[in-house]
Amino acid sequence: QVQLVESGGGLVQAGGSLRLSCEASGRIFRVNEMSWYRQAPGKQREWVATISNDAITTYARSVEGRVTISRDNAKKTASLQMNNLKPEDTAVYYCKASINTQSITGVRHLTPKNYWGQGTQVTVSS
């Protein structure tokens, strides 16, 4: 019904940059806030950044100043520009979106649900 697909991960040297993208598709009435999380090996998933549907952004302290989250409401996408990457940024990065769906007949569901993407690997070498 709803899919979130991330892309843009890869291997980069410390100090380098990557841009992650997340695209929502399906029977979507409205995409509310969109967020990025990450999970490093052996660690719990942690929040990275959030952008509201009116573009208010918040960041985890560990990435603030190095990361920029943005979105394109028309395309139902969110991006995460990551600069000055560090080895400790190595993780699988996940997109999460709060989405109001609609039925095949167009009935709008007023209670949003959270959806997650499958993740994209970011590896930063020292």
Image (spheres, helix red, strand yellow):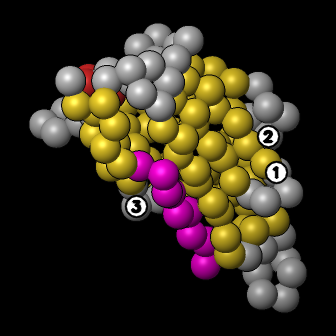
* Position in image of residue 84 (x %, y %): 44, 19
Q: Is residue 15 left or right of residue 73?
A: left
Q: Residues within 10 Å of mark 2 (few under 14, many from 20)?
A: some
Residue located 50% across and 57% down the image: 6
Q: Amino acid at mark 1?
A: Asn
Q: Identify the residue under disc 3.
A: 118
Classify 10 Å Cα crowding around label 3: few (below 14), some (14-19), many (20 and above): some
- Report the mark closest to the observer, 1 or 2: 1
What is the C-alpha distance between the residues marked 2 and 3? 22 Å
Distance, label 3 to label 1, CA atoms, is 21 Å
Q: Position of residue 35 (x, y in %)?
A: 57, 39
As shown in the figure, which amino acid type bears the numbered disc 3?
Gln
Q: Residue at x 52, y 17 (%)?
A: 66
- Of the residues under marks 2 and 3, which one precedes in the sequence? 2
User: Disc 1 vs disc 2: Cβ atoms closer than 8 Å?
Assistant: yes
Whether 20 is among the magenta residues is no
Q: Where the N terminus falls, by quadrant?
A: bottom right
Residue at the disc numbered 1: 73
Residue 48: horizontal and vertical position, in percent?
47, 28
Q: Secondary structure at mark 1?
A: loop
The residue most toward the left is 42
In the figure, residue 109 lies in which quadrant? bottom right
Report the residue that reaches farthest toward the bottom.
Answer: 105
Residue 114 locus on image (x, y percent)? 56, 53
- The label nearer to you, 2 versus 3, is 3
Q: Which mark is residue 53?
A: 2
Give the structural element (helix, strand or loop) at label 2: loop
Q: Which one is earlier in the sequence, the residue at label 1 or at label 2?
A: 2
Give SS at disc 3: loop
Figure quadrant of residue 49? top right
For the record, the magenta segment spans: 1-9
